[in-house]
Image (spheres, rainbow, N blue to C red):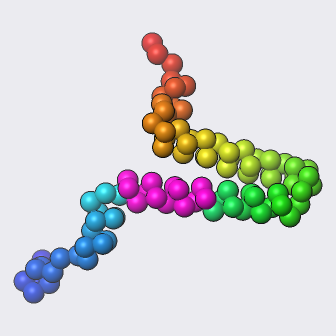
C-alpha cells in the first residue's frame, strides 16, 4: 500500500499518454525511426563503398531487410493489405 500522500500523485501526462495508454503508437513511431536510421546507414554505406558494397553478403542481406521494411511501411501508410494477411492461405 502506498501512503495517501503518494497515492494521490498521478504519473506525468506525457509518459502516461505515450507509453501507458497507447503503447502501439509509441511502437509505430519507433518502427519509423529505426527504418529511417537503417535506411540512412545503407545509403551512406552505398555512397562510401559504391559497387564494393554489393561484394559483401551481409550488406546484401542488410539492404534486403531495409527495402522490405520500407515496402512494408509504404503499404501500411497507403492503407494496402498487410503482407502477412496477403500471404495467409485461406482454407
8 in relation to 23, above or below: below
* Residue 5, x across and y down, in percent: 10, 87
Of all residues shown, which one is farthest toward the top?
91
* Residue 46 placement (x, y as % from top left): 82, 57
Residue 22, picture quadrant: bottom left
- Please, is residue 56 above or below residue 68 in the view? below
Q: Is residue 22 above or below residue 72?
A: below
Q: Quadrant of the C terminus?
A: top left
Q: Left of 24 or right of it: where is 13? A: left
Main SS, magenta residues: helix
Quarter in which the N terminus is drawn: bottom left
Q: Residue furthest bottom?
A: 5
Residue 83 in the image, given as x and y percentages of width and height: 54, 32
Query: Quick check: is 56 in the magenta stretch?
Result: no
Query: Position of 75 compared to 10: left or right?
Result: right
- Of the pair 36 and 24, the residue shown nearer to us: 36
Write down the region rendered in magenta. Answer: 24-36
Q: Residue furthest left?
A: 4
| Residue 15 appearing in the image | yes
Amino acid at each position: 500500500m502506498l501512503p495517501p500522500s503518494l497515492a494521490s500523485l498521478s504519473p506525468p501526462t506525457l509518459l502516461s499518454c505515450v507509453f501507458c495508454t497507447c503503447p502501439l503508437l509509441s511502437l509505430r513511431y519507433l518502427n519509423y525511426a529505426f527504418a529511417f536510421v537503417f535506411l540512412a546507414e545503407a545509403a551512406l554505406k552505398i555512397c562510401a563503398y559504391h559497387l564494393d558494397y554489393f561484394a559483401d553478403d551481409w550488406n546484401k542481406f542488410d539492404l534486403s531487410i531495409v527495402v522490405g521494411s520500407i515496402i512494408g511501411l509504404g503499404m501500411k501508410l497507403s492503407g494496402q493489405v498487410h503482407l502477412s494477411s496477403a500471404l495467409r492461405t485461406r482454407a
